[in-house]
Every structure is written in C-alpha cells, then in structure tokens.
Amino acid sequence: MPAAAADARRAPALPVAVAELAPDLRVQGGGELRFLGLPVYDSYYWAGARGHSTADPFALDLHYRRALNGERIAERSIHEIERAGGAGVAELARWGAAMKAIFPDVGKGDRLTGVNLPGRGVRFFHNGKPIGEIAEPTFARAFFGIWLDPGTSQPELRRRLLGERPIP
C-alpha cells in the first residue's frame, strides 16, 4: 500500500466541533493512502507543533475517496494495532467491538476525524458530527500509532503526515 502525497496546503479546515474540542491545531502534513494502486483516502495530521505525542491534543482527519464498510474499517484498524504489538487479546477484542459500534459506513467524500484527548482517549467524528469516544489512553496510543508510530506499516505516509517529507 504505497502512500503518495496529498497537498497539506489545501487541507480542508477542521470541522467546527473538532476545532472547538482541540483549538490551536494547524495542519502539519498530509498524504494519500492507496491500496493496489487505488486511492482509499487523503489524510491530514493536525497538531499544535511539529512532531507527535499522545501527551498533546491532535487530530487525524481522513477524507475517503471510495466507499468502505464501517465494520471493515474497524477490523483493519485492529489488524494494524495487532501487527504493531500494540495490545493484548482482551484489549483487541474490546477495542474492536467499540470501533465496530462507532465507525459508520463511509462513501466517497465522507470524512472521519479522530481527536486525541490527552490522558483520556479518542473522540471520533463523522462529517464533523460526534459519533463516539473510546476513553482509554492506551487505545489512543495504539490507534494513532497505526499512522504515526515509527513502526507503522506505512512509513512514507507517516513522514508526510508529520511534515517530514516535502510535498512534490
């Protein structure tokens, strides 16, 4: 799943509810996720400063370019967390069930945004409307690690999200 650049300079503004929850965030970078050559989503990382720490508020904003089933999004998320060794069996089962209950089916043009709430967990938004929260800091670390941990399966996308790679 090679990642290509998305133009972070053209990142759509964060939804009002997200900006109110985590003020003073600025887009740090962006990238595109492709699978088998097909675009899946454009992603943008919003933070108060360069770098990444779950001790700080930030948002990961995904703009879907194709329809995906919410349950499949949750399953893929659990697969990536498990691949990274980010949780035990009980946590994976609990988090998988929680994400399946929260994540909606998405269509082309839909937006899912996750906001890191330091010391608390993650609040999720669909097209700017709150859809749920997983109030576990260990979940936040594991979930955002899918994209932002140095051991991610998508290192080029990580570099682009963190603004470490220039936009071509």
Image (cartoon, rainbow, N blue to C red):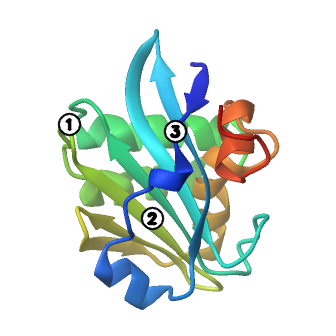
Q: Residue at x 31, y 73 (%)?
A: 15
Label 2 element class: strand
Front one among 40 and 6: 6
- Left or right of residue 68: residue 81: right
Q: Are marks 2 and 1 in contact (CB under 8 Å)?
A: no
Residue position marked by numbered label 2 in the rendering: 114
Q: Could you tell me the amino acid type at mark 2?
A: Gly
Name the spot of residue 127 as percent of width and height, x first. Answer: 22, 62
Tell me, yes or no, if residue 6 can be seen here: yes
Nearer the viewer's eye, disc 1 or disc 3?
3
Alpha-carbon span between mark 3 and mark 2: 18 Å
Q: Which residue occupies the foreground of this view, 72 or 9?
A: 9
Q: Label 1: which residue?
A: 108
* In-image side of 35 versus 72 (left or right): right
| Amino acid at circle 3 | Ala
Does residue 125 sit above or below 146 in this rendering?
below
Q: Amino acid at mark 1?
A: Lys
Disc 1 on helix, strand or loop? loop
Q: Which residue is mark 3?
A: 6
The mark that comes first in sequence, 2 or 1, is: 1
The numbered dot on residue 22 is none
Residue at point 58%, 55% (across, down): 143
The answer to which of marks 3 and 2 sits earlier in the sequence is 3
